[in-house]
Amino acid sequence: MSAGARPLGPVPAGFGAIDGELAIAGLRASELVARAGNTPLFVYSAALIRARVTELRQALPARVALHYAVKANPFAPLLALLAELVDGFDIASGGELALALAAGIAPGRISFAGPGKRDDELAAALAAGVTINLESEGEAARALAIAASLGLRARLAIRVNPDFDLKGSGMKMGGGAKPFGVDAALVPALARHIVAQGAEWRGFHIFAGSQSLDAEAIITAQRETLALAMRLAAEAGVALVHCNLGGGFGIPYFAGDQRLDLPRIGAALDAGLPALPARFADTGFCVELGRYLVGEAGVYLTRIVDRKHSHGETFLVCDGGLHHQLAASGNFGTVVRRNYPLANASRFAAPAEEIATVVGCLCTPMDRLAERAHLPQSAVGDLVALFCAGAYGASASPAAFLGHSPAAEMLV
């Protein structure tokens, strides 16, 4: 790498070149842009998603189901693909419920978590027959009352705020005061109340954190999750029908990141689950994954519309930016900005020759996609590819900021 350049994150496996140009699912980037009609464009590879699901099935015990967290990417064709591949779907709003149902996903495969569920969202979920992961005692009371008014039997689980978190996770979802879930000490009484009210008891959802690349930290969190779930079920005197073990499986975004040791996690579960007491022999378990399933399968394509120099630095100005890729700009939970994987898609096989900062089209200094990146000599009209764009991209970014339009999306 040239002196003064800042490293780019690692390009995920599965991408190649055709005639020197980036190829996604066997198609050149320029072909995909022509098919879409313009840039910016998100492209998601079905083959890479299928490969990731196969990898997970091979590594994890057969007893552990795979759930997809819809918030990672709710693109309708992608949901339809995953409906064929995973066992369940976890939603976080009434809007995501509508998207899941529109994709043909059976309500029995859907669970609904998230604080601040409105009464109309609870009513829609109860009417559809999805499982509601309760976030508080107040939400439980509202769900039971709404179900009674509709003449329905509610399917209810409790989202537990555990006394621990996932060490080294990008976002800590458990441990201490949290808006998510019911504090562990309050869970047994609430579980007994739910069962006494005649609801269909569906168990626990325990999510300690996200985006960890540390297999040992995930193994520890899963071990603590199993112990907590068994203890709470015993204290409540209820069956542990199902337990969502959460997720936390991270993907490498930045230089120096090491890929998660998935087989190690699977081996630990394979050893731990058979050792559970006999009364949990019929308990169903799942892991809830979002970015790990789809993140590395996505590429954001944007076109260079201007090349300029300022105070000795080169800027490549693109027609996309943080309004589609907020996380890559460093404005979505990142404390220190680092470069995502990025490449000149038009010259994917060319050697790096210059240091340039890749920026978007927004009138804000925050709109930077790569800082002082070592790239091939780039020209106006070239396509730029930002990788790891399959999760928390299009739907997690301020697409309407400054009046710009959403990016196109495509599953190939």
Image (cartoon, rainbow, N blue to C red):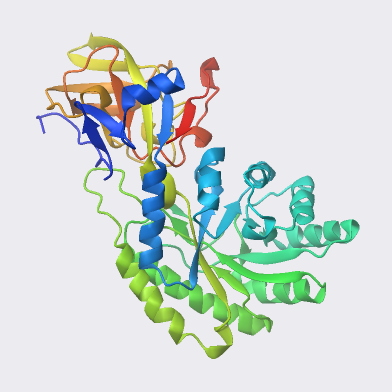
Q: Residue 223 vs residue 194: left or right?
A: left
| 98 vs 332, nearest the viewer | 98
Residue 12 in the image: x percent, y percent?
Answer: 28, 44
Q: Is residue 178 visible?
A: no
Q: Residue 287 vs residue 98: left or right?
A: left
Residue 37 in the image: x percent, y percent?
Answer: 45, 17
| 358 vs 45, nearest the viewer | 45
Judge whether 107 appears above or below 220 on screen.
above
Judge whether 173 appears above or below 310 on screen.
below
Query: Residue at the front extreme?
Result: 26
Residue 205 in the image: x percent, y percent?
Answer: 58, 65
Q: Quadrant of the C terminus?
A: top left
Q: Which of the 4 image quarters holds residue 26?
A: top left
| 345 vs 140, nearest the viewer | 345
**Residue sitting at x 90%, y 57%:** 149
Q: Quadrant of the N terminus?
A: top left
**Residue sitting at x 46%, y 32%:** 410
Q: Which of the 4 image quarters holds residue 21?
A: top left
Q: Is residue 81 visible?
A: yes
**Residue sitting at x 16%, y 18%:** 377
**Residue sitting at x 55%, y 84%:** 281
